[in-house]
Amino acid sequence: MQNPVTVIQSVRLDDENDTLVLLDQTLLPNETKFLELKEMEDIWEAIYQLKVRGAPAIGIAAAYGAYLGTKKSTAETYEALFADFTKVKDYLATSRPTAVNLFWALKRMEERFKQEAGKSVAKVKAALKEESENIRAEDEKICEAIGEHALSLLEPGWGILTHCNAGTIATAKYGTALAPIYLGQEKGYNFNVYADETRPLLQGARLTAWELQQAGVDVTLICDNMASIVMKEGKIQAVLVGCDRVAANGDSANKIGTSGVAILAKHYNIPFYVCAPLSTIDLECKTGDDIHIELRPSEEITTKWYEQSMAPEGVQTYNPAFDVTDHSLITGIVTENGIAYAPYTESLPKMFKK
Ligand SMILES: CSC[C@H]1O[C@H](OP(=O)(O)O)[C@H](O)[C@@H]1O
């Protein structure tokens, strides 16, 4: 039975109208609104402001944006079109630095462009459209495969803690960390999901709790500082999180606060799994120290969710959007090709060879 929430397409191409259609995730859970974007500046802004967010969804949006931006070109030669494509690609690549899917998707679009060398402008544009649609369609299958592998690690009735939102709206469908929750629901696993609110942008409260409630999954919203007590009280049998970039040694960048959850899970002897499409694994990054952590505006901490500021005027803040969970804290990395276990420098490359 199709779960109504998983069929929501948070990122969609409306080619006939030269438009990228995005579910505006900054308005959830209070408003479900789709944006229709034609201009590269608006697409850049939508990625930066997390109107579209989640590593796979960012990659899909960038691929569609690169196609739409190139489609507009009036270039009459392959070379001139490539110059226009490159401008769009390089511009979209500046929107956010941490999720590797943004760069992976843009590189894949560039590789497809080069495969069409010597062909007519029309044929190259058609190829870019096809490639962007392939990226989206593949991500749906990848997330389902991650869900199947992750489900093999879980038992019916388990309490699952998750951080931020790695759900259906962060991907083409199903999500990564939430994929086993949706697949398990179809099979009667009846998980009890505990969602960290995930300050400062509240992806857990606004998005995960919303997605799972809409899907009829048993979800309990907790403040980030409650993760320890729910683990201590035996409510949690596994932690599942998404990721934005996995380094070759297994260090994994994910939403800020994830590494703290991993340390708690280690302390309470609870398995901690990172759900990672291969498109989020960056073997060029040797360790988490090589991952660029995005810093975001102060207002997200001080005023964004309050009728009035809850912090003294002008207080200094530090707002890293992600942190890196050390590979030693990760029980396994669930990919679409199977589950990688430590030592990750050996197991991760094998995932690409299946
Ligand atoms: C399925 S990847 C989701 C991943 O992306 C989120 O970051 P953001 O909300 O800033 O795009 C978060 O790290 C999630 O785990």
Image (cartoon, grey):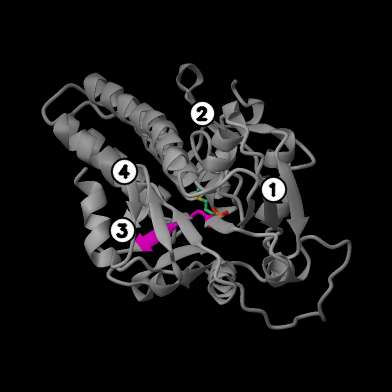
At 34% from the left and 29% from the top, the residue drawn is: 134
Q: Residue 287 placed where, x, y %? A: 32, 72
Residue 49, image x and y in percent? 60, 52
Could you say which quadrant of the image residue 111 lies in? top left
C-alpha gap between disc 4 and disc 3: 16 Å
Q: Which dot marks residue 12?
A: 2
Residue positioned 29% across, 38% down in the render? 109
- Give me the residue at 60% from left, 50% from top: 165
Q: Is residue 238 visible?
A: yes
- Foreground disc of the pair 3, 1: 1
Identify the residue position indicated by label 1 in the image.
192
Callout 2: 10 Å neighbours few (<14), some, many (20+)? many
- The Cα atoms of the two marked residues, 2 and 3, are separated by 26 Å
Amino acid type, callout 1 = Asn
Tag 1's secondary structure? strand
Tell me how far mark 3 sits from mark 1, CA to CA.
32 Å
Closer to viewer: mark 2 or mark 4 = 4
Would you say residue 26 is visible in this rendering?
no
